[in-house]
Image (cartoon, rainbow, N blue to C red):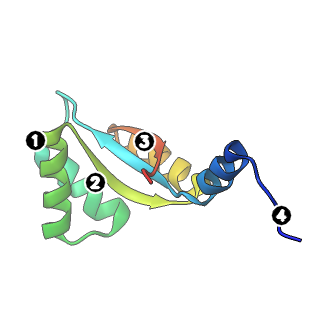
Amino acid sequence: MPVEYEESQLDDLTAADRPWQTVVWNDPVNLMSYVTFVFQQYFGFSRRKAEKLMLEVHHDGRSIVSSGSREEMERDVQAMHEYGLWATLERADD
């Protein structure tokens, strides 16, 4: 016999599978070179990738710099705060 789920239950199941993301936001304080340095230092990104993400922060106001489990992203957000960057945690879009 097939199991029937109500729509809200299916939404909850789908949401549980979506990863979390660390978003770094633009701020008027940190230099672009410093943001690039942080991305290279903490995440181990190449200079090219770090600069690309930094430019997203600068031009778009934000950049998604990592994704994964909630616990991992909480750790990344905390690390960005320790470096003096403005970062938040959010669910990935569908």
Marked residue nearer the N-terminal end (2 or 3): 2
Q: Eyeballing the image, is 36 above or below 32? A: below
Q: Give the residue pinned by disc 4.
A: 3
- Marks 2 and 1 sit apart, C-alpha to C-alpha, by 18 Å
* Residue 3, quarter of picture: bottom right
Location of the N terminus by quadrant is bottom right
Pick the residue in front: 86 or 62.
Answer: 62
Instruction: Name the disc covering residue 82, or none.
Output: 3
Q: Which residue is at a point 52% across and 58% down the rendered structure image? A: 19
How far across and how far down the image is residue 84, in percent? 34, 37
29 vs 11: above or below: above
Name the secondary structure under disc 3.
helix
Q: Earlier in the sequence, mark 2 or mark 4?
A: 4
Q: Residue 44 placed where, x, y %?
A: 32, 69
**Residue 55 in the image, given as x and y percentages of width and height:** 12, 50
**What residue is drawn where x is 83% and y is 69%?**
2
